Image (spheres, rainbow, N blue to C red):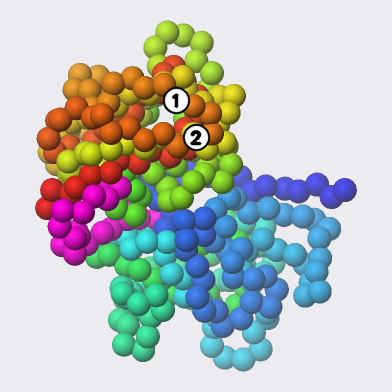
Amino acid sequence: MTDVVIAPVPEGPEFARLGLNLADSSLGAEVLEVTDEFFAPRARMLAPGPAAFYPDRYDDHGKWMDGWETRRRRTTGHDWCIVRLAMPGVLTGVDFDTSFFTGNFPPAASLEACYSPAAVPDGNSEWVPLVPATKLAGNDHRFCAITSDRPWTHVRLHIYPDGGLARLRVYGRPWMDWRRAAPNQSINLLALECGADQVAWSDAHYGEPRKLLRPGRGINMGDGWETRRRREPGNDWCILALGHKGIPESIEVDTAHFKGNFPAACSVQAACVEAGAGTAASLITQSMFWPTLLEPQPLEADAILKFTDLKELGAITHIRFNMIPDGGVSRVRLFGEPVL
């Protein structure tokens, strides 16, 4: 049996450590169009995990590669592809990942973006350069910052002239046009696609709290926030920022796949934190004294529990979700009416 080699994950710049990869296929990103995909299909380039390498694996087209790879170009021009991002977002950076592509990586790559209400951009779409042609190296990560305050829905990757890319990661902040939100409508204010995000947490040994905000139910126990086994007094917690200030109406806690390691109970504190009023570090201290939104409630294994008996706190922007004492939760949803 051939051993598989997994690419190491670099720490990367701040935009990669803190941002969300909007080109993640597990969130719904998709490659819509490619000039060529002879050696390796488009979908692999957007896989959420690190690239893998199987030394002795071949298929009908040649060496099996974990990424997108075109044939050797024998004409003028270059290869490109169009990616629909998982959700509209303000982009902060990109990672051109050539892991395991050593003699077949592109010498250079560039990135453009457009905003298209339609799922597929048409001939009228305006493509704006975000990253100019940039030199790449084999088996490497080329991180490039993006300075743009506009939201984008699609990116177009150019590789010069041909070759393969293991992963394309496009980091940013999800964006939602709240001006178009229907009045008096209750929505999940903790949804990633609404701009919700993680702020701080006590522990994330098995998975970061941002996974609590993902769409749908968790696909396995790794698709959630799980802490190590607590061996000291206290409980684990995380601070989450809502996508928009809102009036909370109900909370759902989903422990999908967590059976022998779900928390015994949970509670929720909340507050309205005005923009610029503190940092992530200061919110950790402040959150200890936030008023209670949901009193401690028992949880169950592999179940969705809905809580409607919430305290009336008015409009809030952040919650502190407390797991008592530790364990794992797949999703947390806070339904309410946005204050527009």
For label 2, the residue is: 303
Q: Residue furthest bottom?
A: 75
- Can you tell which mark lies on residue 90? none
Residue 126 in the image: above or below residue 204: below
Q: Amino acid at mark 1?
A: Leu
In the drawing, does residue 216 fall left or right of residue 91? right
**Taking 123 as reference, is 242 above or below it?**
above
Q: Quadrant of residue 70?
A: bottom right
Do the numbered discs 1 and 2 sit on residues whose CB atoms are within 8 Å?
Answer: yes
The answer to whether residue 47 shows anywhere in this view is yes
Q: Is residue 285 visible?
A: no
Q: Residue at x 13, y 48 (%)?
A: 339
Q: Quadrant of the rendered structure where residue 269 is?
A: top left
Q: Residue at x 64, y 71 (%)?
A: 41
Q: How many marks?
A: 2
Q: CA distance from mark 1 to mark 2?
A: 8 Å
Q: Nearer the viewer, residue 134 or 193?
A: 193
Residue 98's x, y, as percent? 59, 60
Residue 103, how many percent across, how many down? 69, 67
Q: Which residue is at a point 43% across and 74% down the rendered structure image? A: 156
* Local SS, label 1: loop
Direction from residue 59 to residue 270 in the image, left or right: left
Which residue carries the number 1 mark? 299
As for residue 187 lying within the magenta part, the answer is yes
Q: Which of the two residues, 74 or 117, is positioned nearer the viewer here?
A: 117
On the image, the x and y values in percent for residue 203 come to 44, 25
Residue 318 in the figure: left or right of residue 300:
left
Q: Which residues are magenta?
A: 171-189
* Badge 2 amino acid: Ala
